[in-house]
């Protein structure tokens, strides 16, 4: 690492004249209210025409984030983005809001993540920075733990590579934080690999051994050497509140889960995965309770849906059901160490919901929700649970931070995550349910443009990019941007999505280009039948897997989808398997994508096989350095489209990988999308912007036939 970077890292920077010293409640509320009033006046002037929000406002970085309250409940820690520079700040809680007392960090090329209070005085955080790999043009994101006092003194790097100081730093550090150890303020527990080639182990997620790290001196000593299990890599460790490591999680070479438990002393490790109760995907740990052997887990063995159980970690047996939902998975619990009980279980149906087990806690949450009028997350709380940082957010706003004084029942406004977004200008999501052609019930969401008058409109089907995830009623900048430009947006939680039980998720196995694809087409047909969508103005758009689904949709359902937009999508499944060295038909990855299809049959689920069928326009954008789905997936498809005389645009984004992970890349992508849609499937809003010369600037395409 360059010396200049360490100069930046190791100097406590004084910036009291460069940053706002307070976030006054009255002033902030007044400014927000004035801006909202101005916004409403504009909306009133335009009557039925919604305000056109700039693309940059949708993709902007969150200005305030990572807000954490100190153990004593008197101060908060958070990151602030000012221009291109990120600050790590400590502020005191006052009756007027936040008063910044110290700035711990400032930089624009490297950034802080996961800041947290170890004690009321000492703070730890992860520093992320890019370093070039020797003798190559490539850069890697690296990370390292740091500790610093709240007054910006005593900054040290918490190295886990067996060295001290700042010299001879390797390009990555493998520390994985396990426990802050509240009863031992000088130490934390971290996991790392024991192997000499620990960099490779880091990328594989291996953290075999546990070490005790002194956050004041940086000294490290072995705390627990993991048991050696043949052909198994261990990835996660859980400790009880005394710091005793009691639960381990890993994978064998076939990708199956391996779980280890032991009692409160130094008993031998017991392997759980040999019992069908702990099958892959049907059992996962949550957290320790207050009693020595009390552990909480999610298990789907009984009903096929994730259910919260108490688990006796000494015996390896379930010890009573806490909560199950009759339709969806439970995702987590809220636990009070003060009351030594589970207060609530969290699940997601159409909205995020809480099942309460404590009347006082229920009253508190209902009071907060009523006062703020939206869903509320408790971001952090003081050790005595009497002071909390709340994050109020929903699908129309990324989030607002508040301080809640439990005893006084007082809520104090602190800061907005993104100041350029006003909820009254954002179209809300609504839950939908439709039936597929084979009788499966699918849930999802529809977003109607503001002032929707009821007539059929141009529509975008927007599947989520990872088939093993789901869409939520939450902020989605792409969906909000499209609705702001006048489109109806449909987000189906197609079969294979998580959150609806193990059976529903397994219905997606082997269904790329099959029933998963049909679910997306059936969503569009449902919207046509309901009168939402114009049958000749439906497009499909997505990233990664959803980019593949977009290409597959326009290729196999040309009468339904009039255009397709793909970021980093796959066009050739066999080539994808070759690139990933996954052509073993018995492999878990192959089975999840193609099921029992032979290698010779993979062309049937590859969009590149159906180019001659395509009648609509296609837009492909791909990062030139994409190492997940290679850029040749889009490049070869574009060449074949060009040879066949099809209408398409292809843009290869320089210095970009698989993810749209910067504001600049997100904005560029939406600018390309805006110009494409304005030509091939415009709304009245886009027609107006085009006529006025206000469309986003279109870059020169890499290859085009439009």
Image (cartoon, rainbow, N blue to C red):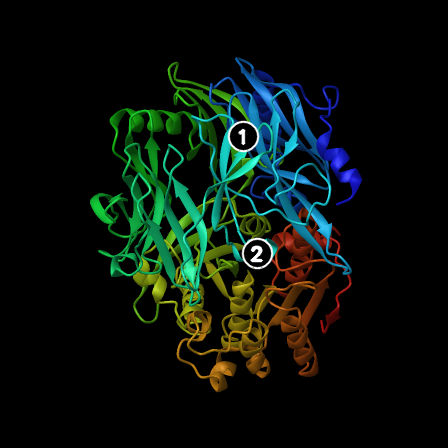
**Residue placed under numbered mark 2 in the picture:** 203
Task: Name the residue rendered at 47%, 22% in the picture.
Answer: 71
Instruction: From the viewer's side, name the closer residue of 619 and 154.
Output: 154
In the rendered image, the vertical position of residue 109 relative to residue 217, given as above or below: below
CA distance separating discs 1 and 2: 28 Å
Instruction: From the viewer's side, name the closer residue of 145 and 558.
Output: 145
Task: Please rate how many residues cluster around mark 2, counting C-alpha atoms within 10 Å: few if below 14, some from 14 to 19, many from 20.
Answer: few
In the rendered image, the vertical position of residue 26 relative to residue 679, given as above or below: above
Instruction: Tell me if 434 is positioned left or right of 462 in this view.
Output: left
**Residue placed under numbered mark 1 in the picture:** 67
Q: Position of residue 554 (x, y in %)?
A: 54, 72
Q: Extreme left residue here?
A: 320
| Quadrant in the rendering for residue 104 | top right
Task: Give whichever of discs 1 and 2 has the lower sequence position.
Answer: 1
In the rendered image, the vertical position of residue 109 relative to residue 139, given as above or below: above
Instruction: Tell me if 53 is positioned left or right of 540 in this view.
Output: right
Q: Position of residue 292 (x, y in %)?
A: 29, 35
Task: Please rate how many residues cluster around mark 1, counting C-alpha atoms within 10 Å: few if below 14, some from 14 to 19, many from 20.
Answer: many
């Amino acid at each position: 690492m360059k010396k200049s970077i360490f100069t930046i890292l190791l100097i406590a920077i004084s910036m009291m004249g460069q940053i706002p010293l307070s976030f006054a409640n009255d002033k902030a509320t007044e400014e927000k209210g004035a801006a909202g009033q101005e916004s409403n006046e504009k909306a009133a002037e335009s009557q039925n025409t919604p305000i056109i929000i700039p693309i940059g406002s949708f993709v902007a970085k969150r200005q305030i984030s990572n807000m954490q309250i100190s153990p004593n409940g008197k101060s908060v820690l958070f990151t602030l983005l000012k221009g291109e520079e990120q600050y790590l700040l400590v502020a005191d809680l006052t009756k007027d809001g936040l008063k910044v007392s110290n700035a711990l960090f400032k930089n624009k090329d490297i950034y802080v993540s996961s800041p947290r209070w170890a004690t009321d005085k000492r703070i730890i955080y992860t520093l992320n920075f890019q370093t070039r790999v020797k003798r190559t043009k490539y850069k890697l994101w690296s990370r390292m733990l740091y500790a610093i006092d709240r007054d910006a003194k005593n900054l040290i790097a918490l190295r886990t590579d067996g060295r001290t100081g700042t010299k001879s730093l390797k390009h990555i550090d493998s520390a994985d934080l396990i426990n802050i150890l509240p009863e031992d303020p000088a130490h934390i527990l971290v996991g790392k690999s024991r192997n000499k080639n620990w960099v490779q182990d880091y990328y594989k997620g291996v953290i075999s051994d546990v070490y005790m790290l002194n956050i004041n001196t940086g000294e490290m000593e072995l705390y627990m050497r993991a048991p050696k299990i043949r052909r198994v890599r261990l990835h996660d460790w859980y400790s009880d509140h005394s710091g005793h490591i009691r639960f381990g999680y890993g994978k064998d070479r076939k990708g199956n889960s391996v779980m280890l438990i032991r009692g409160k002393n130094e008993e031998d490790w017991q392997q759980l995965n040999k019992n069908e109760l702990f099958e892959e995907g049907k059992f996962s740990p949550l957290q320790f309770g207050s009693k020595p052997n009390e552990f909480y887990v999610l298990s789907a063995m009984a009903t096929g849906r994730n259910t919260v159980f108490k688990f006796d970690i000494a015996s390896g047996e379930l010890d009573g059901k806490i909560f199950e939902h009759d339709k969806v998975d439970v995702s987590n619990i809220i636990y009070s160490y003060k009351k030594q009980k589970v207060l609530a279980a969290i699940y997601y149906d159409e909205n995020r919901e809480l099942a309460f087990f404590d009347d006082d806690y229920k009253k508190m949450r209902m009071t907060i929700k009523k006062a703020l009028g939206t869903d509320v997350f408790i971001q952090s709380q003081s050790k005595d649970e009497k002071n909390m940082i709340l994050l109020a957010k929903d699908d129309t706003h990324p989030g607002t931070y508040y301080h809640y004084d439990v005893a006084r029942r007082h809520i104090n406004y602190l800061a907005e995550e993104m100041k350029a977004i006003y909820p009254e200008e954002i179209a809300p999501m609504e839950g939908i349910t439709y039936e597929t052609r084979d009788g499966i019930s699918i849930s999802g969401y529809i977003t109607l443009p503001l002032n929707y008058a009821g007539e059929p409109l141009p529509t975008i089907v927007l599947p989520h990019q990872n088939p093993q995830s789901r869409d939520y009623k939450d902020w989605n900048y792409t969906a909000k941007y499209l609705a702001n430009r006048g489109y109806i947006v449909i987000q189906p939680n197609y079969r294979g999505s998580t959150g609806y039980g193990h059976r529903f998720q397994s219905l997606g196995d082997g269904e790329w280009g099959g029933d998963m694809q049909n679910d997306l087409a059936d969503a569009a047909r449902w919207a046509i039948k309901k009168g939402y969508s114009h049958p000749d103005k439906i497009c499909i758009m997505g990233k990664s897997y959803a980019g593949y689904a977009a290409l597959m949709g326009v290729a196999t359902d040309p009468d339904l989808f009039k255009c397709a937009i793909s970021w980093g999508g796959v066009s050739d499944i066999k080539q994808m398997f070759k690139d990933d060295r996954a052509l073993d038909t018995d492999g878990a990855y192959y089975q999840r994508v193609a099921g029992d299809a032979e290698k010779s049959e993979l062309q049937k689920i590859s969009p590149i096989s159906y180019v001659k069928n395509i009648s609509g326009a296609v837009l492909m954008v791909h990062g030139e350095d994409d190492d997940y789905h290679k850029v040749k997936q889009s490049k070869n498809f574009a060449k074949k489209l060009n040879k066949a005389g099809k209408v398409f645009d292809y843009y290869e984004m320089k210095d970009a990988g698989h993810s749209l992970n910067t504001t600049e890349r997100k904005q560029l992508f939406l600018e390309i999308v805006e110009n494409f849609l304005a030509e091939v499937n415009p709304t009245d809003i886009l027609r107006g912007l085009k006529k006025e010369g206000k469309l986003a600037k279109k870059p020169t395409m890499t290859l085009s036939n439009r």
